Image: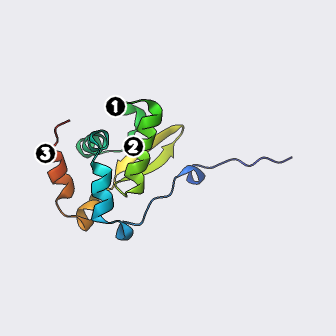
């Protein structure tokens, strides 16, 4: 019986097209303080971070849920680098679609 190996590309979860994202979706994703913290950390880092490098006050499964909500809302891009799930803020796309939103979010950050 032949087995197939999954490539890194096979493991990339689906991401919404930025043109289909609504402000309502983005704001609903950002209502949670844990998700705002994640976005703030990615904004400040200016580089992609693995899930485990962002210190969160929740369990691993709850953190996974928060990352998924952010991805499904179009705020982050996720991919694998080896065994690490990496997260990148879709800064340029979000700034083009919703000018000033990320900057205002980070300026008002009260983690």
Secondary structure category for the residue under label 1: loop
- In three-dimensional space, the C-alpha distance between marks 2 and 3, rounded to whole angstroms, equals 20 Å
> What numbered label is drawn on residue 23?
none
Can residue 86 be seen?
Answer: yes
Where is residue 41 drawn, in percent x and y?
A: 27, 40
Q: Residue at x 27, y 56 (%)?
A: 27
Q: Is residue 86 left or right of residue 108?
A: right
Secondary structure category for the residue under label 2: helix
Where is residue 104 drawn, in percent x and y?
A: 15, 52
Q: Residue at x 19, y 57 (%)?
A: 101
- In three-dimensional space, the C-alpha distance between marks 3 and 1, rounded to whole angstroms, equals 19 Å
Which residue is nearer to you in this view: 44 or 67? 67
> What numbered label is drawn on residue 108?
3
> What numbered label is drawn on residue 56?
1
Mark 3, Cα crowd under 10 Å, few <14 / some 14-19 / many 20+, is few
Q: Quadrant of the C terminus?
A: top left
Q: Earlier in the sequence, mark 2 or mark 1?
A: 1
- Quadrant for residue 91, please give it: bottom left
Q: Is residue 45 left or right of residue 87?
A: left
Where is residue 76 drawn, in percent x and y?
A: 37, 52
């Amino acid at each position: 019986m032949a087995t197939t190996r999954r490539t890194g590309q096979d493991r990339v979860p689906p991401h919404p097209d930025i043109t289909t994202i609504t402000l309502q979706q983005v704001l609903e994703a950002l209502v949670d303080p844990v998700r705002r913290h994640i976005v703030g950390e990615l904004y400040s880092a200016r580089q992609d971070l693995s899930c485990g490098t962002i210190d969160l006050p929740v369990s691993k499964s709850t953190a996974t849920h928060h990352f998924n909500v952010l991805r499904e809302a179009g705020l982050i891009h996720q991919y694998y680098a080896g065994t690490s799930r990496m997260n990148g803020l879709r800064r340029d796309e979000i700034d083009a679609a919703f000018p000033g939103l990320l900057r205002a979010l980070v300026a008002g950050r009260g983690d």
